[in-house]
Image (cartoon, grey):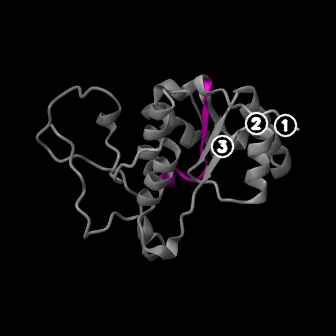
């Protein structure tokens, strides 16, 4: 029987965002909410060094706790086994699968890692909802606190260094019909943060 990491005072979360750079950009707000809920006791699992660099730029405190999937071998079974044991060594209690589907493989990884709780992504392109709305719902389930989906502003991750009267640049990829689900809906008002 696998020993589960369930100590309430020492809960740590593994945040799976092992997709491309654009999807990781869209997940930044959810990552921030989950990281904040776990008082920065988080490990982020990304696809490659490019996504790792983004995570380390935006969340410098996670620089030493970011796992890069491509560094764990080429064979999928070996790769995910190694990642599971790395998460076990990090004493992961929860898994937030921003880019993790409810599959036998994902459940196996969670079991090997010793996680006592796992939340999967339920995103379906055909639902017509923006990806960020799905990521916000996942963050709601993980944190137990509801918050509206909103774009991530780099200035939100720390103190603002200067006052700006200009419009903010919001990173939100998506071009062409194939990626229309990544665009912020024209009908939705983009929430503005207070100056």
Residue ID for mark 1: 2
Q: Among all residues in the image, which is located at the extreme left?
A: 165
Label 3: which secondary element = strand
- The residue under the point 58% across, 23% down is 9
Label 2 crowd (10 A; few <14 / some 14-19 / many >=20): many
Residue ID for mark 3: 117
Q: Is residue 124 left or right of residue 195?
A: right
| Number of numbered discs on residues | 3
- The residue under the point 31% across, 36% down is 156
Residue 34 drawn at (x, y percent)? 49, 39
Q: Is residue 44 left or right of residue 88?
A: left
Label 1: which secondary element = loop
Label 3 crowd (10 A; few <14 / some 14-19 / many >=20): some
- The residue under the point 43% across, 38% down is 32
Q: Nearer the viewer, residue 35 or 28?
A: 35
Q: Are marks 2 and 1 in contact (CB under 8 Å)?
A: yes
Residue 43 drawn at (x, y percent)? 60, 33
Q: Which residues are magenta?
A: 10-24
Q: Is residue 106 left or right of residue 53?
A: right
- The residue under the point 50% across, 76% down is 126
- Inter-mark Cα distance, 2 to 1: 7 Å
Q: Is residue 114 visible?
A: yes
Quadrant of the rendered image containing residue 115: top right
Q: Are marks 1 and 3 in contact (CB under 8 Å)?
A: no
Q: Are marks 2 and 3 in contact (CB under 8 Å)?
A: no
Quadrant of the rendered image containing residue 66: top right
Residue ID for mark 2: 114
């Amino acid at each position: 029987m696998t020993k589960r990491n369930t100590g309430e005072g020492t809960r740590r979360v593994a945040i799976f965002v092992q997709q491309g750079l654009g999807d990781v950009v869209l997940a930044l707000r959810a990552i921030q909410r989950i990281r904040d809920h776990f008082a920065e006791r988080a490990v982020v699992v990304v696809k490659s060094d490019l996504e790792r660099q983004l995570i380390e730029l935006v969340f410098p405190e996670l620089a030493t706790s970011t796992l890069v999937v491509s560094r764990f071998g080429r064979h999928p079974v070996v790769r995910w086994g190694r990642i599971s044991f790395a998460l076990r060594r990090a004493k992961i209690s929860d898994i937030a699968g921003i880019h993790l589907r409810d599959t036998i493989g994902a459940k196996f990884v969670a079991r090997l890692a010793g996680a006592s709780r796992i939340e999967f992504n339920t995103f379906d392109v055909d639902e017509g909802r923006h990806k960020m709305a799905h990521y916000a719902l996942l963050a709601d389930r993980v944190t137990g606190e509801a918050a509206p989906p909103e774009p991530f502003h780099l200035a939100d991750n720390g103190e603002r260094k200067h006052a700006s009267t200009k419009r903010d640049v919001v990173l939100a990829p998506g071009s062409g019909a194939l990626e229309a689900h990544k665009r912020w809906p024209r009908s939705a008002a983009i929430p503005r943060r207070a100056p």
